Image: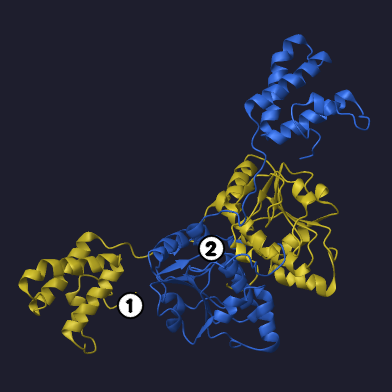
Chain colours: A yellow, B blue
Amino acid sequence: MTGAGTNSTHTPLTGGPAIVLVRPQLAVNIGMCARAMANFGLSDLRLVSPREGWPRTGAYRKGAYAAAAGAVHLLEGARLFDSVEAAVADLNRVYATTARERGQGKVILPPSTAMADSAGAIAAGEKHGVLFGPERTGLDNDDVALADAVITFPVDPAYASLNLAQAVLLVAYEHHRAARGEAAPFAIPERSPPAKREHMLAFFNFFEDLLDANGFFRPEGKRPVMTRNLRNMFHRMQMTEQDVRTFWGAIVRLVEGPRAEKDKSAKKSAPTRSVNSAD
Amino acid sequence: MTGAGTNSTHTPLTGGPAIVLVRPQLAVNIGMCARAMANFGLSDLRLVSPREGWPRTGAYRKGAYAAAAGAVHLLEGARLFDSVEAAVADLNRVYATTARERGQGKVILPPSTAMADSAGAIAAGEKHGVLFGPERTGLDNDDVALADAVITFPVDPAYASLNLAQAVLLVAYEHHRAARGEAAPFAIPERSPPAKREHMLAFFNFFEDLLDANGFFRPEGKRPVMTRNLRNMFHRMQMTEQDVRTFWGAIVRLVEGPRAEKDKSAKKSAPTRSVNSAD
């Protein structure tokens, strides 16, 4: 969305469940999973028997690191295991992601519910992990049997095939929402404050007097409803103090006509500074 | 997760907001966006001035179609526009996705809130769309100015760079959750029903009598608490009728020792059929 890489002004988030990639096939997918984890503040990446081994050098390694788009610390910190049992040995709860029913009678949860439960337990000191299977086949039944519960994504059954990194992204996203909320990753800057009612009413009176003087309110009997409708249109704009000044200045300009150099009439007519500001 | 492609036993979902890719750079990303849309039932893909043109033939087209992983109908149905204004002309509400504050004073929403609002309005007959900018730079300020509101993803500020298809995925996922819920994409098959209390109590009595006969409850005074703890362990298993039969049969087998061929003792001792089933 805004170019790749880390933002050195922030310290990466840590915590959340371990992401356990079981027999992943492609290095580029491992890199994209690392990037998805970093986007939503997960920090524990575990690899079980990657098909091509890990770490690798040359093109293989380049592909993974390029796909990680700056989340290099996750690849450098990834731990390699030769069995799922070893990869989950230190965890208190394990989720298995599956796209098909496995007939194992396990609880099946959407990622939102699973990560809400998990974030609470992790905050209380537990260690959790989520298993993701190989790109082509998904987890096998012995992998699923190691889990306490199953996470299944609420996809369209007609196109149930989620890319591996996208499945990791949804789990990381839901953990982040549950553990840390949905605030934007930047501070919303100070805006001009919402206009005070007295400022808007002063503008309405100025505007309606002008319209009246120009014979806008016809027939006379319609004046009340026409006035109400106009005021409601402006209220829907949720005008700031600056918006009122800007619009007021625009009306003044229209009524007074072209301004000669150094003409201060607009500033005289309007109540405050910078009436011609485009904000 | 489970191999690519469409599932011919289901009709693809349709509806939801239009996904408008503004000046996308890479065909493979257009394909991945189509796949993400199909995963969560969006059907209206619009392309504004793709850098390499659209549709294309040869390797370019191959890359997009391979990345779409079966969501070919979305690529075939994608509409090409030469301006964002033209692409959104028929829409009633437009969201712009941005990763940075743009100082335009627009409402900034997380995808969950935006899509909950949007799904309701779309159900009431409005047409909505979501703008996504070029991979490297994101939307420019003139694109954002065309939107009613901004969607910003609650990413870790240290790694705010979301892949284009992953941003589309999160919007499609949140629309699907809001419009259609979070049900798993398959029917949960009938399981053996949860065990009736009388069945579990019969098992508890059988099991505790055996333990008693073997002198397990020592010291005598601890019998009540030891019994309660055992029963609570079994209750935490949330046993089905079949679970009770299976476990009962296993205990019978342990007590009676190795079974000769044709020995029916297990079946005689246990209350119901298939006591040795592994379920």
Instruction: Give the answer, above or below, for where B205 lies relative to B272.
Output: above
Q: Is residue B104 left or right of residue B272?
A: left
Q: Is residue A264 left or right of residue A148?
A: left
What secondary structure is found at the residue carrying circle 2?
Answer: loop
C-alpha distance separating marks 2 and 1:
29 Å
Task: Give percent across and percent down for residue A36.
Answer: 65, 63
Q: Chain of mark 2?
A: B
- The residue where tag 2 is placed is B153
- The residue where tag 1 is placed is A278
Q: Residue at x 20, y 67 (%)?
A: A231
Which numbered marker is on residue B208?
none
Residue type at numbered disc 1: Ala
Q: Residue at x 14, y 67 (%)?
A: A225
Q: Residue at x 67, y 70 (%)?
A: B5
- Could you tell me which quadrant the C terminus of chain B lies in? top right
* Quarter of the image where one finds residue B201: top right
Q: Can residue B275 be spotted in the picture? A: yes
Q: Among all residues in the image, which is located at the extreme top?
A: B220
